[in-house]
Amino acid sequence: MMTTYEILDHSSGKTARLEARVTKSQKTHFQKAAELTGRSLTDFMVACVQEAASRILREHEAMTLSARDREVFVTALLNAPAPALRLRKAVQRYKTHQHRAADAQ
C-alpha cells in the first residue's frame, strides 16, 4: 500500500486526468478557498479530494474486520464462558429489585 507521502508526491509523473463539471458558484467558492490557502485551484481540489478519500478509507478500514477477526469474534460469542459468581449475584440483585419495584406499583 502506498503511503500518504507517495500518493501526494508531486515530483512523480502525473499522467492521469480527472475532470468534474461544477456550477459557476461552486467554482467561485472553490477558487476563493484555494486563494486563501495559497494554492492553485487544481492543487486545492486534488489536496481536498485526497484528504477526503484518505479519511474515508481509514474509517472504512477501522470498521472492517478481517476474516480472522470475524472468526475470533464469532467463536468468542458462540463459546462464551459461564458467567462468573459476581455476575450471577448482580443479576439476582437486579431481578429482586425489579420484582420489588413491580410489586410497589
Image (cartoon, rainbow, N blue to C red):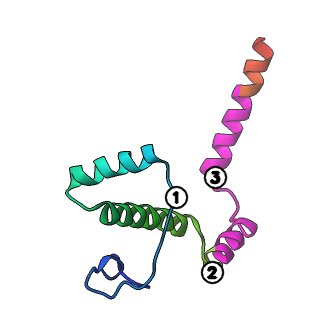
Q: Mark 1 vs mark 2: give the one in front.
A: 1
Q: Does the magenta run of residues contain 2?
A: no
Element type at mark 2: helix
Q: Residue 86 in the image: x percent, y percent? A: 60, 49
Of callouts 3 and 2, the N-terminal one: 2
Residue lying at the far top of the rendered structure:
105
Q: Quadrant of the N terminus?
A: bottom left
Q: Residues within 10 Å of mark 1 (few under 14, many from 20)?
A: few
Q: Which residues are magenta?
A: 70-97
Circle 3 sits on which residue? 85
Q: Mark 3 vs mark 2: give the one in front.
A: 2
Q: Residue 72 in the image: x percent, y percent? A: 64, 75
Circle 1 sits on which residue? 21
Disc 2 residue type (three-letter): Arg
Q: Nearer the viewer, residue 66 or 2?
A: 2
Q: Residue 48 in the image: x percent, y percent? A: 37, 60
Element type at mark 1: loop
Residue lying at the far bottom of the rendered structure:
13
Q: Residue 40 in the image: x percent, y percent? A: 27, 62
Circle 2 sits on which residue? 68
Mark 1 vs mark 2, CA separation in Å:
43 Å
Disc 3 residue type (three-letter): Leu
Q: Nearer the viewer, residue 67 or 79?
A: 67
Element type at mark 3: helix
Q: Nearer the viewer, residue 82 or 29?
A: 29
- Whether residue 93 sits left or right of residue 32 in the image: it is right
Mark 3 vs mark 1, CA separation in Å:
65 Å
